[in-house]
Image (spheres, helix red, strand yellow):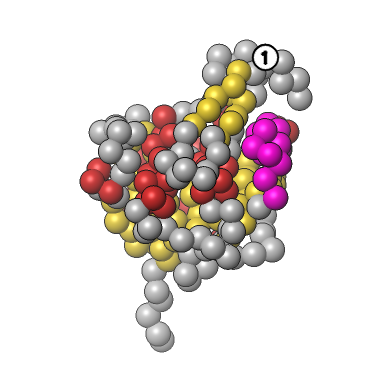
Amino acid sequence: MDFSRFIAYELELSRADAPLVRLLQDASGATGCGVGSTVWDTGLVLAKYLDHQTSLGNLDLSGKTVLELGSGTGIVGIALGRLHPQCQVILTDKKELIPLLNRNIELNSAMSNTRAQCLDWTLPTALDVVPDLIVVSDGIWDKDLHQPLAETLARLAGSETRVLLAYETRKFDEEAEFIAKWSQTFRFRDIKPSEQDPVMQSEDIFMFEGSRKIKAAD
């Protein structure tokens, strides 16, 4: 992949010992890599929410495995890798975005706790681990993605897995349909503005925390 037409982006984290997150992105779409090659507002809001919760001492991922679905530039997963060097982070997306993810990992001192892996929601891909946390940023912008995403979450989440889902509202009725579909397998709550980063939040961006429903005994 030719990165000469990509532009640099930096995200500052609140922890004094956490370096800047450095990324390349294609904000103009000139490279033809699709919407996943751009840093979107939802990714920033989710990354800063995780940063804020870490700074408050509410999030400890030491020894845990984090899976990011539809990573795009990797901003959320790389931020988590910076904040929690003792966790393992797996960035995933379609194969055309893996070179960008690998490049962005390299830009952040080739983080040893973070790796990229191809994962297409429409294919029954398995992982060699059950993630402790799954994060999804702007994964429901296209209605055609709803069923594959719901099935991927149901397939990869274990009984103790937490899921953080964030999206910017664009088509409320379609988004409500996904939430209804997701609720068939997961219970969840909405993350309030008071829990989020005081500055990096938006009334158009919604975040939910979910986990698998416990099946009743026969």
Residue 42 seen in render: yes
Q: State which region is magenta.
A: 100-112
Quarter of the image for the C terminus: give it.
bottom left
> Quadrant of the rendered structure where residue 143 is?
top left
Q: Residue at x 65, y 49 (%)?
A: 114
Q: Is residue 202 magenta?
A: no
Q: Position of residue 5 (x, y in %)?
A: 67, 14
Q: Main secondary structure of the magenta part?
A: helix
Q: Is residue 149 visible?
A: no
Residue closer to the observer: 144 or 75: 75
Q: Residue at x 71, y 15 (%)?
A: 4
Residue at 66 percent across and 60 percent down: it is 127
Q: Residue visible at 55% across and 14% down?
A: 28
Residue toward you, 171 or 68: 68
Query: Taking 41 as reference, is 120 above or below it?
Result: below
- Which image quadrant is residue 198 in? top left
Q: How many marks?
A: 1
State the image coordinates of residue 45 (x, y, percent, origin top left). Answer: 39, 37
Q: Secondary structure at mark 1?
A: loop
50 displayed left or right of 188: right
Residue hosting label 1: 5
49 with respect to 37 (left or right): left
Q: In the current view of this chain or complex, which residue is farthest to the bottom?
A: 218
Q: What percent of the width, then of the height, locates residue 118?
A: 69, 45
Q: For the residue marked with disc 1, what is the amino acid?
A: Arg
Task: Say which quadrant the N terminus sits in.
Answer: top right
Magenta stretch: includes residue 101: yes
Q: Nearer the viewer, residue 52 or 121?
A: 52
Residue 120 place in picture, x, y as percent: 64, 45
Q: Residue furthest right?
A: 1
Dot 1, crowdedness within 10 Å: few (<14), some or many (≥20)? some
